[in-house]
Image (cartoon, rainbow, N blue to C red):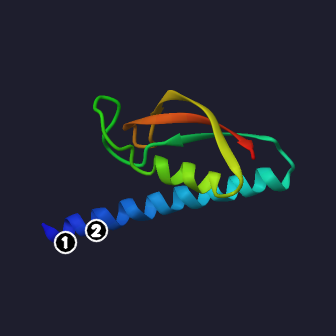
Amino acid sequence: MGFINNAVSRGAEFIRNVKVQGATDEARKAHAEGRAILVYKIVEASGGGLDFTGPMTGVGEQIEAIESEGWALANMATVESRTLSGDERAGLVCVFRRR
């Protein structure tokens, strides 16, 4: 069972890292284009869903990645999101402004 749990954990970490890199790339691109506002949808990386209180996997990391590129989170709203497999995930539409 330990092998399976480790494999699942590595897979989740890989997906989280890809999402963080994507957020970083989009923040850099928006800055290079001279944009003052970046609207970015962040979907929770895994499980948890919408029905309990707790950490939203990967969300903080993506916000931090965008802010590290000189953007400041100005506002956010929740949205319903589904993965390609149809799983429900919490989503946030985040509005960032250049600092």
Q: Quadrant of residue 4?
A: bottom left
Alpha carbon distance from label 1 to label 2: 6 Å
Q: Return the x and y of residue 70 as percentages of the image width and height.
A: 71, 54
Q: Quadrant of residue 28?
A: bottom right
Helix, strand or loop at disc 2? helix
Amino acid, disc 1 = Phe
Residue that label 1 marks: 3
Relative placement, left or right, of 84 versus 4 is right
Amino acid, disc 2 = Ala
Q: Return the x and y of residue 20 as percentages of the image width and height.
A: 55, 58
Helix, strand or loop at disc 1? helix
Q: How many marks?
A: 2
Q: In the displayed structure, would residue 57 be above or below residue 4?
A: above
Residues tagged 1 and 2 counted as in contact (Cβ below 8 A):
yes
Q: In the displayed structure, would residue 13 be above or below residue 79?
A: below
Residue depicted at 63% across the width and 52% down the height: 66
Q: In the displayed structure, would residue 8 be above or below residue 77?
A: below
Q: Return the x and y of residue 54 as percentages of the image width and height.
A: 31, 39
Residue that label 2 marks: 7
**Front-lying residue, 79 or 66:** 66
Residue depicted at 58% across the width and 34% down the height: 93
The numbered disc on residue 69 is none
Q: Residues within 10 Å of mark 1 (few under 14, many from 20)?
A: few
Residue depicted at 48% across the width and 35% down the height: 91
Q: Residue furthest left?
A: 1
Relative placement, left or right, of 84 versus 73 is left
